[in-house]
Amino acid sequence: MTNPDMPRHLEVKYGDQTVAAAEVTTANCPAGTARTWLHATSPHVPRGLRANLVDAVMDLPEVQASTRLEAAIPLGDSELLERLRERTTDAVTRPAGSTALLDANIPEGVHRGDRDHQPRDRGDREDL
């Protein structure tokens, strides 16, 4: 298990190419809050891979142990936003330049459940 105070870097790959990535931290956040920045590295990402990135973030132990999520995503990325809303409650979004900010509650004990996803402990980078 990695240190929950250290930022985590997650990547989703399509073949050998990274198509989406996220940074996740609980350090320097209000108690019980996880922060994440998610983005696609290409505008042409096959449908579903961005949602996989959200699932990987939400399934991290330090995120599951949190009660609030603060997320930054590219404005207009409907797949990331839709999946974040599915995995959280009471989500509020607002634009901030070219970014959308989401503040939401993390439901207690909610896991994706439709696939066996366990983030791998590989230092500060994870490929999914």
Image (cartoon, helix red, strand yellow):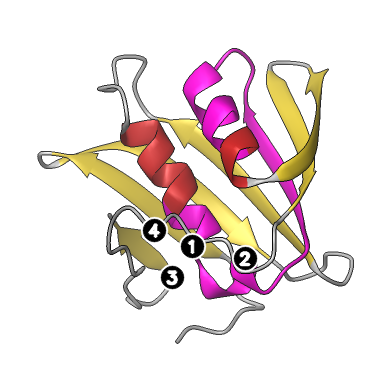
Q: Mark 2 belongs to which amino acid?
A: Val
Query: Does label 4 or label 2 sit earlier along the sequence?
Result: 2
Vertical arrangement, residue 99 with respect to residue 120, above or below: above
The residue under label 4 is: 113
The residue under label 2 is: 63
Which of discs 1 and 4 lies nearer the camera? The answer is 4
Query: Does label 3 or label 1 sit earlier along the sequence?
Result: 1
The residue under label 1 is: 59
* Residue 62: in magenta span: yes
Q: Residues within 10 Å of mark 4 (few under 14, many from 20)?
A: few
Tell me whether the residue at label 3 lies in contact with that at label 4, contact meaning CB atoms closer than 8 angstroms. Answer: no
Measure the alpha-carbon separation of dots 3 and 1. 16 Å
Which label sits on residue 105?
none
Measure the alpha-carbon separation of dots 1 and 2. 7 Å
Q: Mark 1 belongs to which amino acid?
A: Asp
* Residue drawn at (32%, 63%) of the image: 117
Magenta segment: 56-84
Return the residue nearer the eye: 42 or 104.
104
Which of discs 3 and 4 lies nearer the camera? The answer is 4
Tell me whether the residue at label 1 lies in contact with that at label 2, contact meaning CB atoms closer than 8 angstroms. Answer: yes
The picture places residue 23, in percent across and down from the top left corner, at 55, 53
Q: Mark 4 belongs to which amino acid?
A: Gly
* Residue 126: in magenta span: no
Measure the alpha-carbon separation of dots 1 and 4. 10 Å
Q: Mark 3 belongs to which amino acid?
A: Asp
The picture places residue 79, in percent across and down from the top left corner, at 48, 23
The residue under label 3 is: 124
Q: Secondary structure at mark 4?
A: loop
Q: Secondary structure at mark 3?
A: loop
